[in-house]
Structures are given as C-alpha cells and as structure tokens.
Image: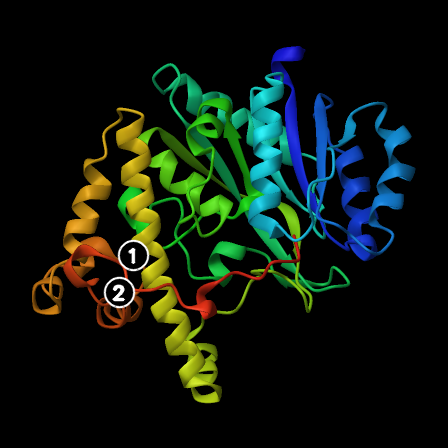
Amino acid sequence: MAAALVDVLLATWNGERHLAALLDSLLAQTHPDLRVLVSDDGSTDGTRALLERYRPRFGGRLLLLPQRPAGRGGLGNFEYLMQASLDDAQAPWAMFCDQDDVWLPHKIAQTLAEMRRTEQGAEPGAPCLVHTDLRVVDEALAPIADSFVHYQHMDPAHCTPRDLLSMNQVTGCATMVNRSLLAMALPFPAEVVVHDWWCAVLSGSGRRAFVDVPTLLYRQHAVNQIGAHSRSLPQRVLRLLRNAPAVLRSAGAAGRNSYRQAQALEQRLRSLQRDASLAADYLAWRNQPLWQRIRTYRAYYPGSEMDRLLRCLLWPAPAQGKPPPHPDAAQAPQNPQG
C-alpha cells in the first residue's frame, strides 16, 4: 500500500476555532493511506496544543514540521510543506488542506482515482494536477451554494492552459498534485501569486483534470484569505458602486500579477528545457498596444464577455514588455492560512 500514500499538506495559523472539525474529517477518510504534514505559522492561540491532542488519534500519521520563523503567510507555509513532502520522497501525491474546511469522506479516494487515470494517459514524469468542485458553506456549515464553480461562474472543465494564465480556476483545498509537479513548482519564484495558481499554470505542460463533484465543505468566515464571493452581475455592480476605486485597483493588480507570474512560468519552463511557447505567446500578446489586443482578446481571456472586455481595458500592456512597480495593494494578506 506504500504506493498509495497521499500527503495532506495542512497550513495552520490561529485556527483553533475550526481545526478540530477539519481533523475529524481527515480521520473519517475512506482512503486509509494518508499522512498529514502540518506547518504552523506562529499561532498564538491553542492551535498547536490541539494538534498535539489529535496526534495520537492519527497513529503516527500526523507530523508537525519544525517551526520556521513566523509571518511567512499562506504562500510561504505551503511552499515549506511542498518542499517537505518532496524531500521526504515517500508519497507519490500531495493534497493542499486549509485549516477551516471539512473534507467529505471520499475526497481523497475520488481525487486519487482520477489522478491515476490522468497519469495513465500522460507521458512518464509529466506534471499532473487533479481538482474538484466544492460546496460553499457559512461559518456554521450551513449551505450557501452546492457548487463553488457555479457560484463563481467558472468553467474549469473546459478552461485551457492559456485561460489559466489570466484567471485561476483551480482551488487549492480541492487539489491533488503528483511529485513531478511538486518538483517543477519548487522553489517558488518571487512572482508567484498563490500556490494553487502556480501549480495550475505548471500543469499546462502536463495534464490537468477536473472532477465535477464537491469533495469538501468550503467554510466562509470573516478572515478567509481568499474565499468565495458571488460573481453575479448585481453583486458585482453593487461592489463597484460601494467602492469603485478599490475595485479598479484590485483589477489592475490582478493584471500585473498575472503578467509577472506568466513571466516566471516562461523562465521556469525554459530552465527545465520544456516547451515555453504558450507562455511566450501570451506575454508577447500582452505587450501589444490596446488597439491590437482589442481584436483578439477573446482568444486570450476566459469568462463572460464582460470579464474578457474588462481585462482587455483594465490590464494595460507593460511598458516595453517590463512590468510596472508592484504596489503594496497587490500584496496578499500575510495570514491567515484558510
């Protein structure tokens, strides 16, 4: 059964309030061969004590990694976990795990079954990623939406590797990656926005599969780092009316971040002697003036017609192919992990 070992990469920070429900759901998984690697980012509540109380229940399958300097945030925490799993070289697959969600019992088994099918159809050593849908719930686990992807107006089953360069449609807590993708992803370039998006764009050089079934309860609360927000037209208009400057700043930051990450992708693929033509073509197109991009933006930007057009208008071409300075507003929150 060693070949079926799955590493669950759990990043924590002050997560005592919801962590027990998550750990209970991991213990209830139908796939028995899992190991939970935990990295805590300097919690000041009872998170570490709770983990210690649960450790005997996992029978040696819950490992707390040596604590690193605090304040690295979710991105640094997941990078540390990914490196630990890769260096340990026991588990062929790894799954990202947020401290405040609840996994449904067949989450690992369903995702792993699809991963095996995906790897069978890929070249040996290809980076592979499998992700699933989620159920959106409130803090008390009451239903908000049966399908996260429908709630967000996403179409991950049909999005292309080029689509992923502009818009992430892979949710980390619903994702499994193989060791080949872990090796390609590490170490993170400075331009990486979030760990799941970086893994998603790397999967474009291998295989990615979407399972159209919710495998976890995606808990929404006041301190979600990213979270799920309704993308219906009325809600989006309302957000614009409430704070148009913030919405426009966020849109501009998204454009700059996607450009920089595509640059990092091209460099990483070239360093690994893999085909980087998709990223290079995307960057060359982004460098064109608006009057040229306006003719072909539908081929490069996914989503609704409104989303595509807004990206074309609000994501300016970097001057001479160089990204503009990175504003503080574009920085992701340093905590929490969920």
In the rendered view, does 217 fall on the left or right side of 51?
left
Q: Position of residue 37 (x, y in %)?
A: 70, 32
Circle 2 residue:
308
Residue under the image location 41 percent in, 68 percent down: 327
Query: Residue furthest toward the front?
Result: 69
| Quadrant housing the N terminus | top right
Type of residue at label 1? Pro
| Colour convention | rainbow
Q: Where is residue 328 in the image (x, y as percent from the top left)?
A: 46, 68
Disc with the residue nearer the chain's start (1 vs 2) = 1
Crowd rating for badge 1 (residues with CA inside 10 Å; few <14, some 14–19, many 20+): many
* Between 183 and 231, the one nearer to me in the picture: 183
Circle 1 residue:
302
- In this view of the protein, can residue 160 be seen by the observer? no
In the rendered view, does 284 fall on the left or right side of 263?
left
Q: How many numbered marks appear?
A: 2
Crowd rating for badge 2 (residues with CA inside 10 Å; few <14, some 14–19, many 20+): some
* Between 249 and 93, the one nearer to me in the picture: 249
Asked if the residue under mark 2 is in contact with the one under mark 1, i.e. CB atoms within 8 Å, the reply is: yes
Residue under the image location 27 percent in, 46 percent down: 162
In the depicted structure, whether residue 183 falls above or below residue 80? above
Image-quadrant location for residue 303: bottom left
Tell me how far mark 1 sits from mark 2, CA to CA. Answer: 6 Å
Considering the numbered disc 2 on the image, is that residue within a helix, a strand or a loop? helix
Image-quadrant location for residue 8: top right
